[in-house]
Amino acid sequence: MRQQLEEEIFGTGQPGGGTGEPNRRAMQSFAALVVSLTVLVGGGFAAYHFIGPAIEKFVATDDYPGPGSGSVTFVVDEGASGSEIAAGLVKAGIIKSTSAFISASSATPDQAKAIQPGSYTMQKEMTAKDALAYLSDPTHRSVKRVTVREGLWASEIYPILSKASGIPVKDYQAAAKNTKALGLPAEAKGNVEGWLFPSTYEFDKKSTAADQLTTMVKQAVKVMTAEGIAKDKWEETLIMASIIEAEAGSSADRPKVSRVFWNRLDEPTGETAGFLQSDATVSYGAKRRAVAPTQAEIDDASNPYNTRAHKGLPPGPISNPGKDSIDAAVHPATGDWLYFVTVNPDTGETKFSTTFAQFLIDQNEFKAWCTANPKAKC
């Protein structure tokens, strides 16, 4: 009966043991008590009228009187089952038995379902009912929440994670080198760039730098799997998505920017001869954030990410793209554009063209913006 109750409330799993856990003989006595009372009284409401108080009295012997005292940190792990939570509470000395917690959960199933992963500062020797109510209240939950926006380099993400967690940047840098431990797919060729999926994360206080990077990599894989992208196309997709993320002036322009670059790749002997000519890739290789690269950076053929000097895609992603850019890489707009230029970086206004002559006209608008904004480092 206790196992059935656990499955109905929390789904699956067996309740754990621990200090104060009723022994097998006590549980057998409890089952016998329920059966005896059921036979004696019969079914329906009458049975509950007699059995209910008996059950409550039995469970009460396995519950602390409360209200509790002292302070103890309790962690609900991601994906923890109800039985695991109950067993952990017993082990921490917060509740007396798992049976009391499961009983409280059966009485208020909405509270049981509201428990979220995170750290909670609780008291020892609480009643199971109070412990459940405390865990179900999100205001009592303490997690490391950090937002990583789209388009950042891995080297820019580590300080953001470090500031939120207190873990040194060097720990993230070291963790990023152990790509096997992070679960980085072989397609990434040992480079985490592009695979640290941007989102808002809630990391447990005990999470390490490796734990956090692993979560981000898993999320990237999850998104690409949901997109239906073939595994042998994951790296290519992320490379293209990262360029789109860096180059698109607005979300609406992403599919059109994607089309421009795919058109260039699809025509290696055409007008653009297979050169992407992306300023963002040049700047990434030069490791300098700028609206546009310098002429010296453009002329630097030693930069493997210089797509003005080298045909095709760069050797790896140039940023960590979000879902919209991944969508755009997979589903480019329909069109024959070969050129585009963001004529106003402040507003993101971008103009697309099919000829180099029109591109030069559009580019003059961008140059005019640069002249009016000398601090923009054009």
Image (tube, grey):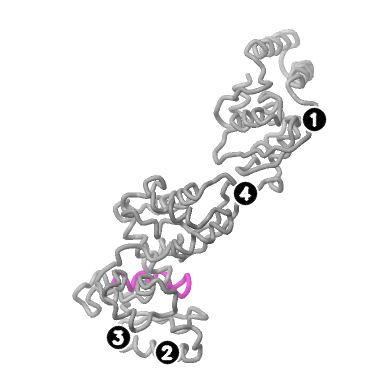
Cβ atoms at labels 1 and 2 below 8 Å apart: no
Type of amino acid at the residue the image marks with label 4: Val
Type of amino acid at the residue the image marks with label 1: Gly
Mark closer to the observer (1, 3): 1
Query: How far across and down, in percent of the image, does residue 136 sit?
Result: 69, 41
Type of amino acid at the residue the image marks with label 3: Phe
Mark closer to the observer (1, 2): 1
Locate residue 314 relative to residue 120 in the image: left or right: left
Which residue does the numbered mark 4 point to in the structure image? 143
Q: Report the disc number at residue 367.
A: 2
In the figure, 155 relative to 23: above or below? below
Q: Gap between marks 4 and 1, in whole Å?
A: 27 Å
Which residue does the numbered mark 1 point to in the structure image? 66
Type of amino acid at the residue the image marks with label 2: Lys
Mark closer to the observer (2, 4): 4
Cβ atoms at labels 4 and 1 below 8 Å apart: no
Q: Report the disc number at residue 195.
A: none
Nearer to the camera, 48 or 184: 184
* SS type, badge 1: loop
